[in-house]
Amino acid sequence: MKMSQLFVQTLREFPSDAEVMSHKLLVRAGYIRKLTSGVYNYLPLMWRVLRKVENIVREEMDATGAQELLMPFVQPEELWKESGRWEVYGKELMRLKDRHDRGMCLGPTHEEVITFVAREGIRSYKQLPVNLYQIQSKFRDEIRPRFGLLRGREFIMKDAYSFDTSQEGLERSYKVMADAYTKIFNRCGLETKAVQSDSGAIGGAVSHEYMVLIDDKDNNAGENDVFYCKKCGYAANSNHAVSNLPDAVIDGGFSECRKVDTPNTVTIEQVADFLGVPATVICKSMIYIADKKPVMALIRGDKQFEETKVANAIGAIEIRSASPAELEEIFGAGKGFIGPKDLKDIPVIADLTVKELKNFVIGANENDKHFVGVNWGVDLSQPEFADIRLVEKGEFCPDCGEPLFVTKGIEVGNIFQLGTKYSEKMHAVYVDENGKEKPFIMGCYGIGISRTAAAAVERHHDEFGIKWPISIAPYHVIVVPVNVNDEKQVTVANQIYKELLSKGVEAVIDDRDERAGVKFKDSELIGFPFRITAGKTVEEGLVEFKIRETGEVLKITPDEAIQRVVDAVSQIK
């Protein structure tokens, strides 16, 4: 490909609406252009990258025995009503009507459709196990699409679904997919960590996310906090992480339950200072509006709520914190003075941290007042307890007891043990060896193709531009004649370019009549893994060979430069 013919327009400045580096660089380097909020055109360079990611995924999926198919992007509401998700999925599901007034949706995921496929096509246990996958565009109507390809509304995804006859079979399929995922991301130049996670709207009892960890404090691309143990390897998303806590004071030391004045004590710290007690003996109350109804959540005063855990514990689809006006309307008191005593018709969910508290402090549901000396079973009835706490750095690993560390992570893949969540509701069954109908035991396995490419940019870039891993780079090498009016430089550059093409290398030659500085800046911004420059040194029989990832520059012969690129390319095939 000649640079003069390559459809790419680089920009001098980053786009004003871009927040993360992958978004900034992919726009500035001419890979993507926004069409509308959260929807992007994949320009030729980007499409080459995406196809390479797809091909790596295909090769590894096919190697496991999985079979590729393609399911419809538009899905009928009937299937979603069968699974029960039509009403509960949320506003991210783009619903529409066809000309016959039939309900449809743009597919954000394909559990219902694949279950339909299995229901229609698999009759006997003799056809199992089977794993079917597709690579396709998806659409989720995100409330706030941001971060470019890391959180768009339209995106490309690989999703696979396994069908087994037993839990043991599902666990084998799950392990096969987990191993394949590690190979896929390694081949894409990404080191990932499989972390325990919440299953969310997909469902299932067991799930893991594959995270690209972002240790750079200045990089805000990581969407999730990942807690991990350096000793035993425990790792979990913040919405699923658990920990052991250090010893703390849990007895407030009050001799009796009584109401006390606590003026101007809105925060936990203010209450603790006023009463002269540690925050660990204060029971913090939070009112959530869960599916339009109020719910009270309780936690120890020194800890924070994890809202996904709260929603799961109370079985809510959507939750939000109650507004000050709602608190006044429901309790007649403001924030900081709400408590669980004498509640009527409001369910209460309590974190495990408050279960062992004694003689503790709660809000009195009156402004500027608290109860002290409260005890479960005496002054308060026992609530339902669950883990609804946000883990914090330095708390102890639940598996080995060592301190936990935290970092940011970009999710690029996920795997779920669905079990019979969809097959039972949709009556997707097979006939077993005894002639009895049984529901499929299902697994679900997703990889964000476009997210993986963007994550690679987040991990591989510098102040000059992208540093693509060679396995997914749009082209392997760019050949740059410094002066297109110098016959010898052009001749050497063209000879190198043609020789590279003949050896199966994806090469670009920068034949533009531009200053060398412009060519070099574009090559670094776009991120070609290698650059071969034919400049004044061609008179000595040498060219400049630059490795983008390391910045190493060598003066070598054209044949040596060609061989280095050929050797590097051969290692990825």
Image (cartoon, helix red, strand yellow):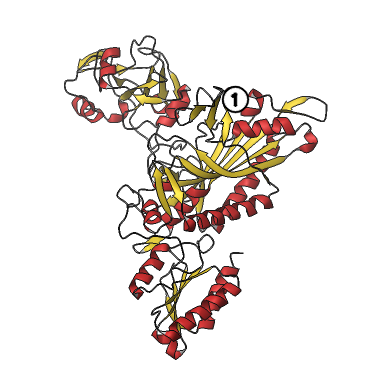
Q: Quadrant of residue 101?
A: top right
| Side of 171 where 103 appears, left or right | left
Q: Which residue is mark 1?
A: 83
Nearer to the camera, 1 or 279:
1
The structure residue drawn at horizontal position 35% and vertical position 17%, both measured from the top left corner, is: 375
How crowded pointer 1 is (Cα within 10 Å; few <14, some 14-19, many 20+) is rated as some
Amino acid marked by disc 1 = Ser
SS at mark 1 in the image? helix
| Side of 185 where 131 appears, left or right | right
Nearer to the camera, 331 or 103:
103
On the image, the x and y values in percent for residue 370 come to: 24, 18
The structure residue drawn at horizontal position 38% and vertical position 48%, both measured from the top left corner, is: 221
Above or below, comparing residue 482 to residue 54 in the picture? below
Check the image and name the residue furthest to the front: 99
On the image, the x and y values in percent for residue 504 come to: 60, 70
Nearer to the camera, 201 or 300:
201
On the image, the x and y values in percent for residue 239 come to: 44, 36
Check the image and name the residue furthest to the left: 263
- Whether residue 232 is visible to the viewer of this picture, yes or no, is no
The structure residue drawn at horizontal position 70% and vertical position 33%, both measured from the top left corner, is: 118
